[in-house]
Amino acid sequence: MKAVIPMVIAALALGQGAAASATTLNVLNWSDYIGKDTISNFQKSTGVNVRYDALDSDDTLQAKLLSGHTGYDVVYPTLTYMTNQIEAGVYEKLDWSKIPNRANLDPELMKKIAKMDPGNRYGIPYAWGTEGISINLQQAGAALGKDADVNALGWNLLFNPEVVSKLSKCGVSIVDSPADVFPIVLAYMGRNPNSKNPGDYRDAYNVLKKIRPYVTQFSSTYINDVAGGDVCVAYSWSGDAGMIKRRVREAHRSFQIEYLVPKGGGGVWFTMMAIPKDAENKDDAYKWLNFMLDPKVSAGFTNDTTYITADAAARGMIDPAVAQDTSIYPTSEQLKSYFVLEPIDPDIRRTMNALWLQFKANR
């Protein structure tokens, strides 16, 4: 899912320390995760001032929500966290009659989300993406040999030691995130990617430790490494893959980057929008939610960030380099084969984290 740098964005029209009022909407979202003109356009069209803060982690948001005093009217949780938060009763049940632009949402995405938000009662998908592999075709091809078929190799590019050992010559990067990597390894093994069995994770660790000698880096900020040609294969999030491709084009590099979600699918993650139960300005929160689902607004978000909007009506307004790239922007048919990352039990999370530390330490 989206990697972020903690920051606070200055409030627009009001100072950061100003008290909330009936004309101020308080929004908590991830950094660099909104169209560049979205806030100013919302203010112009509604007359509502916006105080916009940047979120540094889902754990920070969860602590605010559970305290019952968030100080925000709209928040942007990750779906895997939101499920337990719904059970804790921290969100306002949505009045969909106040969000007519709901009709623009992709029905296939809504079906997947409904597995964790039954009836789609509390959350609206803002952005989503997949997990796959960014590949420098020229460098990887040279390392693997001219007859190599990267599409056929699929996840073997990252998890088969015979293949990874060859790619280590040009650089192999894996995100430093056990919650993202372990489910993919389990799927690669033919296991349930959302397994609740600790033994499955120990088996996945045994797969990972065989490739450890060939991993160049553990990084969630790999975009420049791939775009600059320093790494030829990287475990990637789709939004980052789109940014890599954009930077390669802008720099007029001589190589080609492909983003591959191997056959059998990969993980799908979602960033949601929701109204906290303690929100003080719910009327304007609904205006914001509906505005964010306007196709022009949604398209602007994707064009500015390369992260995919859940607004199906926006697709025709999105940069063709993104909209027509089905590896980054999957079709509804492709989406059916992908699995949704589910909430992780605390015991499983502890197991994953312990095994991940062993993996990184090469023990």
Image: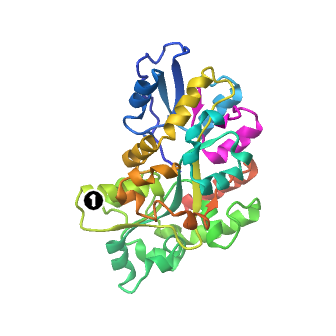
In the rendered view, tell whether residue 211 sits above or below residue 14.
below
x, y (%) of residue 254? Answer: 24, 67
Q: Position of residue 287 (x, y in %)?
A: 54, 29
Give the residue displayed 71% in from the left and 38% down from the top.
85
The amino acid marked with disc number 1 is: Arg
By what rule are the colours in the image chosen? rainbow
Task: Check disc 1 and report its element: helix, strand or loop.
Answer: helix
Q: Quadrant of the C terminus?
A: bottom right
Q: Nearer the viewer, residue 295 or 14?
A: 295
Residue 62 visible within the image: yes
Closest to the observer, 104 or 289: 104
Q: Residue at x 37, y 45 (%)?
A: 304
For the image shown, how many numbered marks are present on the structure?
A: 1
Q: Position of residue 284 (x, y in %)?
A: 56, 25
Q: Observer-nearest residue: 209 or 71? A: 71
Examine the rendered structure and indicate whether residue 60 appears above or below residue 182. above
Give the vertical position of 197 relative to 121 (above or below): below
Asked whether, in this view, residue 119 is left or right of residue 128, the answer is: right
Q: Is residue 88 magenta?
A: yes
Q: Is residue 178 visible?
A: no
Q: Is residue 337 above or below residue 46?
A: below
Q: Residue furthest bottom?
A: 147
Q: Residue at x 34, y 54 (%)?
A: 224
Structural crowding at the residue carrying mark 1, measured as other residues with C-alpha within 10 Å and reported as few (<14), some (14–19) or many (≥20): some
Q: Which residue is mark 1?
A: 249
Q: Quadrant of residue 246?
A: bottom left
Check residue 171 for magenta coloring.
Answer: no
Q: Where does the magenta region start and end?
A: 72-96
**Residue at 32% from the left image edge and 68% from the top image edge:** 256
Q: Position of residue 34 (x, y in %)?
A: 44, 39
